């Protein structure tokens, strides 16, 4: 898809839906629209049916947890370009003692449901982002009635993030076990889990119990936002030609 075609799509979306869309952005050739949960079904149906768009294919539905978004512990500007061993700073969501782990975290616009659509007829893609209005019980409308293939995608997002899809015909877990506690892709979910399973020879059956045999641990992702090597090379090159 060319940049011109992508820009044209953004302009058409704004012209068609106007203030119904909270935002329309095109970054790196990818167009993303943000809209309220109450407008999702109407906008999705129009994107599917109207000749100008014809987004007939639903590619993916996924959940997002923005807890700790923008917090980075790895210093990538003033440490060695070959090692991160001494580049950890701060107390972001990835590093905390077990006693200090997040409890009852409630931040604005924490959860979102993201939908990826494809128009085969026009060879275009678009991303829909819908933020849940309630972080305690995150709820968005189900798209199963618009694209039946959303069924298992929404079940996965419910299982892993706890996002509820209103109107889904069979919203139940799809990846975790029947007795699983919590939603494992939430940022404040313990990496050791909440319960463990073992066979009890006395009861002669499998039992669930709180985790006791695994040492609590956390992992810190290496997120490079600004690579100091490229910044230094840019500074050494000086001003671009034609600029003063």
Image (tube, rainbow, N blue to C red):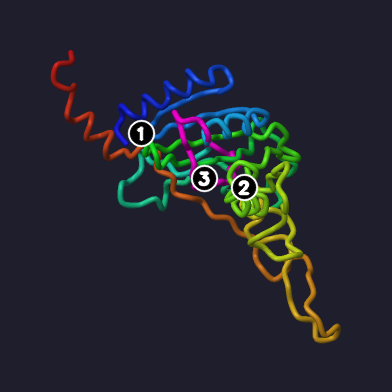
Extreme residue toward the top, this view:
244
Which secondary structure, mark 1? loop
Look at the image and say whether residue 60 sits in the magenta stretch: yes
* Percent coordinates x, y for residue 164 in the rendering: 71, 44
Extreme residue toward the right, this view:
203
Mark found first going from the N terminus, 1 or 3: 1
Q: Quadrant of the N terminus?
A: top left
Q: CA distance from mark 3 to mark 2?
A: 27 Å
Report the label total: 3
Which secondary structure, mark 2? loop
Q: CA distance from mark 1 to mark 3?
A: 19 Å
User: Which residue lies under the disc numbered 2?
Assistant: 187
User: Which residue lies under the disc numbered 1?
Assistant: 29
Which secondary structure, mark 3? strand
Extreme residue toward the left, this view:
241
User: Which residue lies under the disc numbered 3?
Assistant: 58
Q: CA distance from mark 1 to mark 2?
A: 29 Å
Start and end of the magenta stretch? 49-70
Mark found first going from the N terminus, 3 or 2: 3
Look at the image and say whether residue 111 sits in the magenta stretch: no
Q: Is residue 190 left or right of residue 72?
A: right
For residue 97, say whether it is visible: no
């Amino acid at each position: 898809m060319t940049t011109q075609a992508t820009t044209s799509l953004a302009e058409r979306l704004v012209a068609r839906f106007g203030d119904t869309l909270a935002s329309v952005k095109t970054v790196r050739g990818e167009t993303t629209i943000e809209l309220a949960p109450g407008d999702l079904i109407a906008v999705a149906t129009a994107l599917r049916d109207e000749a100008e768009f014809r987004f007939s294919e639903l590619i993916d539905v996924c959940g997002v947890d923005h807890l700790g978004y923008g917090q980075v512990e790895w210093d990538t500007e003033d440490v060695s370009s070959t090692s991160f061993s001494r580049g950890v700073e701060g107390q972001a969501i990835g590093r905390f003692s077990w006693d200090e782990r997040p409890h009852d975290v409630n931040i604005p616009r924490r959860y979102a449901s993201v939908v990826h659509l494809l128009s085969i007829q026009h060879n275009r893609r678009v991303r829909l982002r819908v933020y849940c209005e309630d972080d305690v019980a995150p709820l968005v409308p189900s798209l199963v009635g618009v694209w039946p293939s959303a069924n298992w995608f929404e079940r996965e997002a419910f299982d892993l993030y706890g996002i509820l899809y209103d109107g889904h015909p069979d919203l139940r877990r799809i990846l975790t076990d029947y007795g699983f506690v919590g939603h494992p892709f939430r940022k404040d979910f313990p990496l050791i889990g909440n319960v463990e399973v073992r066979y009890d020879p006395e009861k002669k059956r499998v039992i669930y119990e709180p985790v006791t045999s695994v040492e609590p641990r956390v992992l810190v992702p290496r997120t490079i936002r600004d690579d100091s090597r490229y910044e230094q090379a840019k500074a050494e090159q000086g001003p671009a030609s034609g600029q003063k």
